[in-house]
Amino acid sequence: MLSLVDLRTRLASGSLSPEAAIRLAQEAIAAHEPAVGALASRLADPRVPGAGPLAGIAVGVKDIIDTADLPTGMGSAIYAGWRPRADAAIVMRLRDLGAVALAKTTTSPFAGLDPTATRNPRAPGRTPGGSSAGSAAAVAAGMLPLALGTQTGGSVIRPAAFCGVAAIKPSFRLLPMVGVKTVSWALDTLGLFGAGIRDVAHALALLADRPAIDLGRGSGLGPEAGSAPRIGLVAQDFAGAPEPAMAAALARAVRAAERAGARVRDCALPPPLPEAWAAHGTIQSYEARQALAWEYAAHRAALGPVLRGQLDAAQDLTAEAYDGARRHAHRARRVLKDVFGEIDAILTVSAPGPAPEGLASTGDPRFNRLWTLMGVPCVNVPVPGDGPPLGVQVVARFGDDGRALAVARLIERALARET
Amino acid sequence: MLSLVDLRTRLASGSLSPEAAIRLAQEAIAAHEPAVGALASRLADPRVPGAGPLAGIAVGVKDIIDTADLPTGMGSAIYAGWRPRADAAIVMRLRDLGAVALAKTTTSPFAGLDPTATRNPRAPGRTPGGSSAGSAAAVAAGMLPLALGTQTGGSVIRPAAFCGVAAIKPSFRLLPMVGVKTVSWALDTLGLFGAGIRDVAHALALLADRPAIDLGRGSGLGPEAGSAPRIGLVAQDFAGAPEPAMAAALARAVRAAERAGARVRDCALPPPLPEAWAAHGTIQSYEARQALAWEYAAHRAALGPVLRGQLDAAQDLTAEAYDGARRHAHRARRVLKDVFGEIDAILTVSAPGPAPEGLASTGDPRFNRLWTLMGVPCVNVPVPGDGPPLGVQVVARFGDDGRALAVARLIERALARET
């Protein structure tokens, strides 16, 4: 994989020019894209800024994020060739930092559960996950050092786990959503994919203009946590049990964290957190019905079957049910804040198991939904192994993105020493 | 003016057909639009649904709200003739209810403070206000019974006051913002303009699918308030003093409310509410810098001078200042909730005075900013008089839109009996 931090080191030393760094990505794309199919479109001859903290960094932009110089197809024939007038705010931020938004990455239609044709570079014959399929696959294939995705249910953490890459879904609205196609305004969150935890931490600190998020500068771990963070192990029983391979990966992550000095203990989520998990679907469906009202009314037949079925069912949801779900989520956020008074981070699985076989399903976001609804930062830490990729999820308090990344980095390093 | 409720009564009785009701609006437009200039574009030959609770209602849609069948110009040459792919969620909601989105209404460029060429039908030679200039002026001129605007600072309540029409800026996110050009995602709020309080109440209840908002069905005034709502009179000293004409209008509204049985007492906003007022500008500027980053980078010279100056200044704002302003606002929202434990509604001025003379300024939103930041429902109640229009503002607790409208209606009726 192309590591953003490694590229930055070579760029800073002068051993690599920004043009040459972008060429690395272009050569990797030429070599791997035919087999992976992670890109919806790309710039043939990009202008490469010579300066800026992300100069030389080629970025993939999920194809529900507006770009003025490349089509924004939403993963759907309904928007084939669509050219927005303006770049999304996050794309402008990338440009301001000197990065090149080199390619649009595939997305399931309107970031839903209908699959893409993208292959999983790390698990042949298995889905790369969704909806940010192309962003996860492009980073996993070594085509791009950084890619943007979005998560409404589990569309960042799940594909990252399936493809064996690092990713963060930051705190809600830490990154600007202007110019990103809306599915659910209370849930949609931009996220980042990179080769390792340091890469996504560095990128997030720059994009959010919060240097303290970056590992090494300010870890988010205060003196009271020191090198021994308090980690709560959360089973998420309300979402069912993970597969044995995933349970084993979680156990390995726990042992690695403990060897690295973390204090890990079981953490049962108090009410109303388990119940809030069920509120996620009500909020997503009620808002998606409004957000995609034009597509549903004008192009229902052209929607993917899963999304069409979800929107069909959503027509019957009442404002009362929606308001109740929002109140439930509001109460749960307060209780979760108290939970984080006792621990620095939560450790849980990123997905039920490895990527499902075939491309018919993008996998199940059931272990991601609660955290998206809570708006808290989530980081996928790949767990190295022999089979298809597996990942565990580190979750921290709202606004504590730096701490989530610091704990994720501790586990990543401990797992690397083990293998 | 065209009253939505009156039209609905005639439509329900069969004395008016939906086609004829739309024709009424078209005829009024033909008569008044040349002098007012409230419309950016309009449908020549609209399809008129025969059924639905808003069948026969012609609606004006502020020209920063996406429509698939009419251009969406954002009040700026940068978007001249721009055709979005999809209708905004609120436009789809109007269509679902049977309404006809007949015209796009003028907006100041990107809903900022640079003026439009729209005239004030009720105050010749004076600004109609902004940024929802066309929506307020079109309703005031009797061209349309309902119009959509947006408020980030004071862009619904202020033009309503200047043009002598009723308006509500509902609770934050009660109406969906998908497909509305973003200035500030924490502040931007869709609002409604109508001839009277009953009209905007009826429209909001339908658009939000919350029947209890409608006056008469459920007033939002519980038995404890009865016909004697407790009203807190708020001076907003932190925003300066209103002009004498406005102070006199507020005093008239107080006396009218008291005669109608309300219990009115002075209400000093406790800390940190006065200080939160100053946080509004930081949040708006920091988010606008990101939301309009493409326009600023690619078309800075084509921006209006006021907006350009604001964005120039916003380039120096830090994430730290923004995070501080958000924390401040968060604390203020909790304190305001406690304030509403003692009173049913706040009464304050809608603007510093009548509309300023000339079209160079759209007026000052300083008495609106705090309430937009708090996300609470605000209603403009026109105060009848001989001079240019004046309005007072009724504010209620977050989510209590029905109560804000009920108290506003009580004051509107009491003022009407007086004149």
Image (spheres, coloured by chain):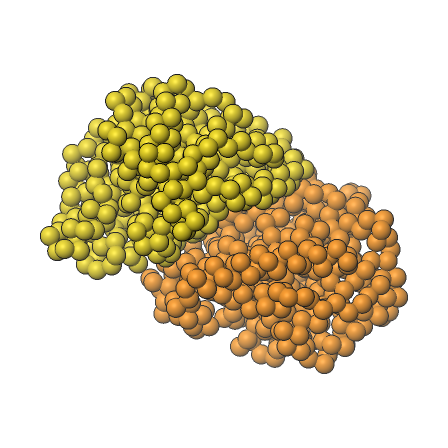
Chain colours: A yellow, B orange
- Residue B291 lies, with reference to residue A263, above or below; the image says below
Most foreground residue, A361 or B24: A361
- Residue A164 lies, with reference to residue B382, above or below; the image says above
Estimate the x, y position of residue A56 in percent, counting from the top left. 20, 51
Is residue A46 at all visible to an observer of this figure?
Answer: no
Estimate the x, y position of residue A132 in percent, counting from the top left. 36, 36
In the visual, does B411 lie left or right of B375? right
Q: Find residue A38 and report its image quarter.
A: top left
Most foreground residue, A389 or A299: A389
In which quadrant will I find the N terminus of chain B? bottom right
Estimate the x, y position of residue A35 in percent, counting from the top left. 21, 28
In the visual, does A167 lie left or right of A186? left
**For the point 76% across and 74% down, which residue is it?**
B249
**For the point 35% across and 35% down, which residue is it?**
A257
**For the point 62% across and 57% down, which residue is it?**
B333
**For the point 47% across and 61% down, which residue is it?**
B322
In which quadrant will I find the C terminus of chain B? bottom right
- Residue B240 lies, with reference to residue A297, above or below; the image says below
Query: Which residue is at the far left?
Result: A15
Q: Find residue B385 and report its image quarter.
A: bottom right
Q: Find residue B119 and report its image quarter.
A: bottom right
Estimate the x, y position of residue B56 in percent, counting from the top left. 68, 46
Most foreground residue, B154 or A21: A21
